[in-house]
Image (cartoon, rainbow, N blue to C red):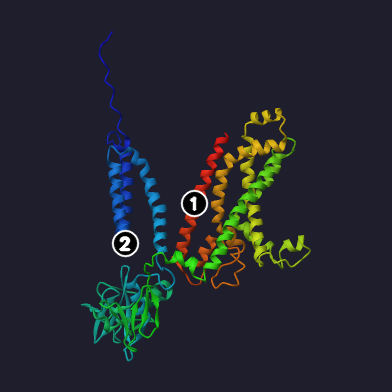
Amino acid sequence: MSTETEVPAPPAESPARSWRGIGWGFIVKLMLMMLVNAVGLAIIMSAWGIEQWTILWVSVALLVAANWIYFAKRTLPLKYIFPGLVFLLVFQVFVMGYTAYVATTNYGAGHNVNMQQAVDAALIQDERQVEGSPSYPLAVVRDGDTLGFAVTIDGVVQVGTEEQPLAAVDGATADGSGMPTDIPGWEIVSVSELLGDQALAQQVTDIRVPVSDDADDGSLRTRNASTASIYKSTLVWDEETTTLTNTETGVVYTPNEYGTFVGDDGSELTVGFYVNIGLENFTKAVTDENYAGPLLKVTLWTFAFAFLTVASSFLLGLFFALVFNDDRIKGKKVLRTLFILPYAFPAFMSALLWRGMLNAEFGVINQWFFFGADINWLGDPWLARFAVLFVNLWLSYPYWFLVCTGALQSLPSETTEAAKIDGAGKWRMFRSITFPLLMVSTAPLAIASFAFNFNNFTIIYMLTNGGPRFTDASVPLGSTDLLISAIYQISGIAGGRADYGLASALSVVVFIVVGIVSAIAFRQTKKLEEIQ
């Protein structure tokens, strides 16, 4: 009998760390990390370019962490969870944090840039052609992606871009009219190319080339890409006092705490900038008379819509599930298929079809079922709310029909058989056994459905677009608007005056409300587990 002890073989090295053999695992990992580093460096350089230091340092930290995790030996669990953590940080934490940040600002129409950008915009908007300015023959020149102007001044060809003022170019030539014909280091853009490329032509007309380093000398602009004139702004920016002064009227514009330049005569510039206003957007929703009343109605309707939709669709789906769970029903498979057809239709398309059918004048609902009566389903506030609930019931009950059918078929038969032996009737068995057991599996889905319908933008936007509008409010909100569609209206995406700060504040409120309701509901559903 041998007394030698076998030494266990060392664990095989992971293919992703091994150079032995072909080493394909390590090569693939190396190529993937090269791709990750390239993307990461591109993001870092972009953040550096726009001076977003928080994004830059977070990107640097994530890139360093990625390289350390995937090239270290003792970080095996992190290798699996790190991509998920990055996606969580980018798509959840960052989005929520940025929304909360915007909610504390006055970001919106007229206040969507920072102070320096607002000053630049004000100077550009106020630019006027200098009286008596000569018209210089112009050639549009290009160096890669950089566009510039070439003009001949006092017989000298000079070239400038938006970043570089005019400067003479050695070796440049011009024809008898002064039009530059050859500029070393620059390509002259032909007129035919400008005429055939509208985007390029618009880019040329937007260019402002400084005449010199002194901003008071003005800048060259062109309207026809063949001649240029000097333009100046009547506004002058003073960095020390942070004021804009109109040199013609003498009015001095000073920025206030709301990001607006207010003149000493009470006038305001149309260009403003975003500033931090604290919690003003949150209090504005309940204190501003333009928003408080309409938003209160919208909030009450949102809760009612979400609750009634879930309750009605669940009860109708449960009813059909109980009916078609009876063994005496023939053709159950065919009937179940027919009942779930609405669930297979795209919700937005169904809503549009119902919008047409509910048309008061031409809709088939009035023509076929109400003898051509003029019932304004979508124009009356209460009828519109009823229509929204009815259409959403039509869309939602198949889901609960499927859920309840599956839950009923999974219930233990021993319990119901024991109840029958004890003499319990069908209603008693349903009330005391079937329904409680059914709720164990369906209650979490009902909570999720409540949260979904709380933010059910599609049905509202496609069916009523939030209408009919409130007649006693100045804001663009209506009787069927939910909070989510109200946020859409206030954000100004659909046109009108945008208020992203208030829209973000309402988004935060909706998030908190849905979170609290869901947390309380899930806590209550734990009691149902005791039934099992």
Q: Which mark is residue 108?
A: none
Q: CA distance from mark 2 to mark 1?
A: 34 Å
Q: Residue furthest bottom?
A: 132
Residue 478, position in %: x, y?
Answer: 59, 67
Residue 462, position in %: x, y?
Answer: 59, 61
Residue 57, position in %: x, y?
Answer: 29, 55
Q: Residue at x 54, y 39 (%)?
A: 527
Instruction: Say which quadrant the N terminus sits in.
Output: top left
Q: Residue furthest right?
A: 371
316 left or right of 42 in image: right
Three-letter amino acid code of the residue under disc 1: Ile
Element under label 2? loop
Of badges 2 and 1, the one in the foreground is 1
Depth order, front residue of 474/50 = 474
Q: Residues within 10 Å of mark 2 (few under 14, many from 20)?
A: few
Whether residue 232 is visible here, answered yes or no, is no
Q: Which mark is residue 516?
A: 1
Q: Which is more N-terminal, label 1 or label 2? A: 2
For mark 2, what is the residue? 52
- Residue 263, placed above or below residue 284: below
Indicate the quadrant where residue 241 lies.
bottom left
Indicate the quadrant where residue 459 lies.
bottom right
376 left or right of 261 in image: right
279 left or right of 176 in image: right
Element under label 1? helix
Q: Residue at x 41, y 68 (%)?
A: 107
134 left or right of 301 in image: left
Q: Residue at x 69, y 44 (%)?
A: 320
Whether residue 445 is visible here, answered yes or no, is yes
